[in-house]
Amino acid sequence: MKSRGPYRRHSMQFKLQLCRDIRGGVIGRREAQRTYSVSANLIQFWLTQFDRGELNGEEGEASVIAEYEAASRRWSARSAS
């Protein structure tokens, strides 16, 4: 069994384009898995978000900002200790 590598983050543009291509029939899920080394579960998660309209630029930017703010608060709390 192949060892799992480090976690990767994928850009919102990549996720959107991949979902559009899969839904448009440009590429199949299995081909996307092999080509981009992305798990089937992750692709399904993105497609579910895409179908619900949750995978768009504005929400993606908001989540990045929220993650940054949470990390800043944790860092500030550690520094104050």
Image: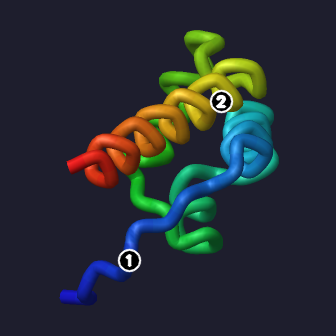
Front position in the image: 16 or 32: 16
Q: Amino acid at mark 1?
A: Pro
User: What residue do we see at 56% from left, 51% from top?
Assistant: 29
Please tell me how crowded label 1 is: few (under 14), some (14-19), or many (20+) other residues with Cα within 10 Å: few
Q: Quadrant of residue 17?
A: top right
Q: Quadrant of residue 2?
A: bottom left
SS type, badge 1: loop
Residue 25 seen in the figure? no
User: What residue do we see at 61% from left, 32% from top?
Assistant: 65
Q: Position of residue 63 (x, y in %)?
A: 56, 28
44 sits to left or right of 22: left
11 sits to left or right of 45: right
Q: Amino acid at mark 2?
A: Gly
Check the picture and name the quadrant holding the N terminus: bottom left
Question: Cβ–Cβ below 8 Å for labels 2 and 1?
Answer: no
Q: CA distance from mark 2 to mark 1?
A: 22 Å
Determine which of the numbered discs, if any, sits on residue 60 in the image. Answer: 2
Front position in the image: 6 or 2: 6
User: What residue do we see at 39% from left, 44% from top?
Assistant: 76
Q: Position of residue 59 (x, y in %)?
A: 65, 20
- Which residue in the protein does label 1 denote? 6
User: What residue do we see at 77% from left, 27% from top?
Assistant: 57
Q: Position of residue 32 (x, y in %)?
A: 61, 60
